[in-house]
Image (cartoon, helix red, strand yellow):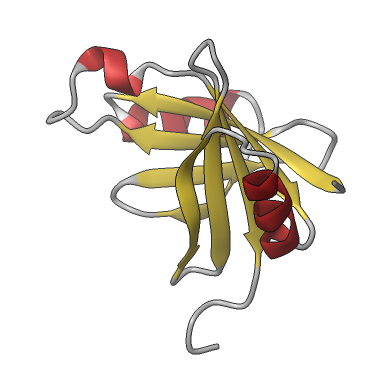
Amino acid sequence: MNIVASTVVFTVDDLAGSRHFFTTHLGFREVLDTPDFTWLSRDDAAADILLHQRDLELPQERIAQPVVTFAVTDLAKEYTRLGAEDAPITRRLERNPWGERLMRMTDPNGIVVELTEWIAPSGA
């Protein structure tokens, strides 16, 4: 596996407040902003931050899981390999319209590991 970037995901109640905090005080910039999440980055070696709006319909214990995201190359190949290894895949490989392919696994302690690959957006 070739990891090319890392992202820390935070589930928050006040998306705008956290976005303002990280961009104003810590020098992050918005890469992508939607009603459900904001992706923040810097030009140095800092991990990217994904701020995810808490879904009020989900119980608190379901949304408080720690998540680490690794951007990888050839995610389809990794997905096949992990499936053959009986890895605990908790979200099947999918493609999002904004140009991201992703899958998730969950470790025995509830840590969610998300693997992503950035691709051309649908229709691009």
Q: In this view, does 103 lie above or below 101?
A: above
Residue 89 appears at what percent x and percent y?
Answer: 52, 39
Question: Residue furthest toward the left?
Answer: 57
Residue 12 appears at what percent x and percent y?
Answer: 34, 24
Which residue is found at the position 62% from the left and 77% from the top?
Answer: 120
Query: Which quadrant would residue 41 be assigned to in this image?
Result: top right
- Horizontally, residue 109 falls left or right of residue 86, namely left
Which residue is found at the position 67% from the left and 57% from the top?
Answer: 80
- Residue in front for this viewpoint, 8 or 84: 84
- Horizontally, residue 59 falls left or right of residue 42, namely left
Q: In this view, does 58 lie above or below 90?
A: above
Query: Which quadrant would residue 68 be assigned to in this image?
Result: top right
Which residue is found at the position 63% from the left and 37% from the top?
Answer: 28
Q: In which quarter of the image is the C terminus?
A: bottom right
- Horizontally, residue 64 falls left or right of residue 28, namely left
Residue 34 appears at what percent x and percent y?
Answer: 36, 54
- Horizontally, residue 42 falls left or right of residue 100, namely right
